[in-house]
Amino acid sequence: MGKANSYRALKTTWIALRILGLDPPERYKTLYQVYSVFLNFTVTFYYPFSMFINMFLLDTKKEVVSNLTLTLCVLICSIKMFNNFTKQKELRKIREYLTKLDADVKVVADEEYLEYIVKVSFQYFALYASMYGLVAATCELPVMFAPERRLLYPAWFPWDWKKSTRTYIVLHLYQLIGICIQIYQNLLNDTFPGILMWLLKGHLHVLKSRIERLGYDRNLSADENYNELVACIERHKLCLE
């Protein structure tokens, strides 16, 4: 086995954060910030805003209730993304923590266990991605089979899309791209905590194994065993952070 690398389990998460404007690269930071502001203003902010405003323009309570569920889902997704934005420093610390934890893994059995943890993490993400991908692939169907021109989702726009084909196409593309981004944001929000907790479980298991091995290696002195115990305590504190 090679050196432990549990950080790989979060590879898809960091890619998602980068695409969604929450993980600036070392190069082209200014350009990336412009991209991040544009993306999050036009989708993360305005998408739920347009749907929320539209609810006040509906004629009946039935229409309001029928649109409330979707509007709240989109709004909550945006709130979660805003929370991710405010926690960027904490998210980046996770990389450092996992690197430190991986560096202490020197037993083959522990490496194999972490490899299993990473494998399950990929499967977990793939399962969610397939379900969310199916949603994205079918969200266009109601529009395709609608008897008359309609938006993908009820929303307010300051342009008359009913009378202008060009305006309708632009707004329809905006909603289609926007909902795909929202779905991607939900994928990130729903998988990241689960994968992170699964990784934590894996490293706590490895830490438990390290503690169980203390005192059984006759080649180590009492001081070396003591230092190993102190190292285990420090790594446990790191896991709790």
Image (cartoon, grey):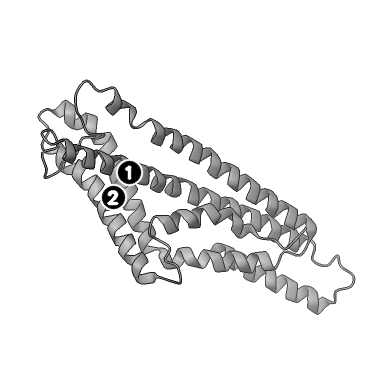
Extreme residue toward the right, this view: 218
The image shows residue 123, relative to residue 45, as above or below, that is above
Corner quadrant of residue 200: bottom right
Dividing the picture into quadrants, the one containing residue 229 is bottom right
Residue positioned 41% across, 46% down in the render: 184
Q: Position of residue 155 (x, y in %)?
A: 19, 39
Instruction: State the residue position of label 2.
Output: 43
Percent across and percent down for residue 63 are: 17, 28
Residue at disc 2, secondary structure? helix
Q: Position of residue 95 (x, y in %)?
A: 55, 65
Foreground of the two, 94 or 178: 178
The relative height of residue 100 versus residue 69 in the rendered view (above or below) is below
Quadrant in the picture for the N terminus: bottom right
**Residue 39: x percent and y percent?**
31, 55
For the residue pair 63 and 148, the one nearer the viewer reads as: 148
Whether residues under marks 1 and 2 lie with C-beta atoms below 8 angstroms apart, the answer is: yes
Q: Is disc 2 surrounded by few (<14), some (14 to 19) or many (20+) residues within 10 Å?
A: many
Mark 1 or 2: in front is 1
Who is closer to the viewer here, 8 or 149? 149
| Residue farthest to the front, as pictured | 166
Side (left or right) of 48 relative to 238: left
Q: Which mark identifies residue 77?
A: none
Q: Earlier in the sequence, mark 1 or mark 2?
A: 2
Q: Residue at x 70, y 67 (%)?
A: 104
Tell me which amino acid carries mark 1. Ile
Q: Nearer the viewer, residue 165 or 66?
A: 165
The outermost residue toward the bottom is: 223
How many residues crowd mark 1 within 10 Å: few (<14), some (14–19), many (20+)? some
Residue at figure coordinates x 55%, y 63% from the top left: 240
Could you say whether the residue bearing mark 1 is in a helix, strand or loop?
Answer: helix
Q: Which mark is residue 177?
A: 1
